[in-house]
Image (tube, helix red, strand yellow):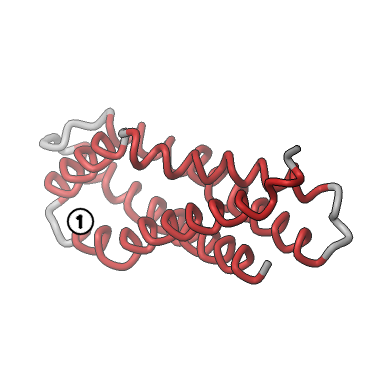
Amino acid sequence: MVARLGEPLALLSTLGTGLVAGVFVAFSTFVMQGLARLPAAGGVAAMQAINAAAINRWFLGLLFGAAVTCLLVIAASWGAAGNRRAQLRIAAAVTYLLGVMAVTMLGNVPLNEALDRVTATTPEALSSWAHYLPRWQTLNHLRSASAIVSATLFLLA
């Protein structure tokens, strides 16, 4: 049953990974640079507000929905793993799951949670922001690249 859904699942995964790539690229190319120009208290407060706003059904539905369709693509393609298109789909799905979801859950989310524990107007905010900003940006660049590669592999498949 799942194998017959390979094409529609790959299409949904292409769309989902591409949209996620767009969100992350926006953060990499201008959102974080804008926040970095603010004083630490402003950057911390703004990022805390962004992180709180990101917990919504639209963004999380997109992020995790793409992960679910990627898992289903792997299941649908596994039996035909000798086929070039199936190999590309599996590679695309694994790239998203590791490069986007694992990095998000193991890197960006813990950084966000640590930043959330800081009061933006305290002296601690300056050191927290100095620690947070370059690490979060590096991880986000990795997520951006992974989502772009994933969407590209899905397109090639």
Residue 84 location (% of width, % of height): 80, 67
Give the image location of residue 131, x and y in percent: 34, 48
Quarter in which the N terminus is drawn? top right
SS class, disc 1: helix
Say which amino acid is labelled 1: Leu
Task: Work out whether residue 129 or residue 90 is closer to the camera in this orientation and state it.
Answer: 90
Q: Which residue is mark 1?
A: 35
Which quadrant does the C terminus fall into?
A: bottom right
Q: Nearer the viewer, residue 123 or 102?
A: 102
The image shows residue 23 at horizontal and vertical percentages of 36, 56
Seen at 25% across and 59% down, the residue is 31
From this view, report whether residue 140 is shown above or below residue 152.
Answer: above
**What is the count of numbered marks?**
1
* Image spot of residue 145 (x, y percent): 51, 64
Measuring 48% from the left and 44% from the top, which residue is drawn there?
Answer: 104
Residue at the image position 10 percent from the left and 36 percent from the top? 121
The residue at the point 57 percent across, 66 percent down is 149
Residue 50 is drawn in which quadrant?
top left
Q: Foreground: 92 or 141?
A: 92
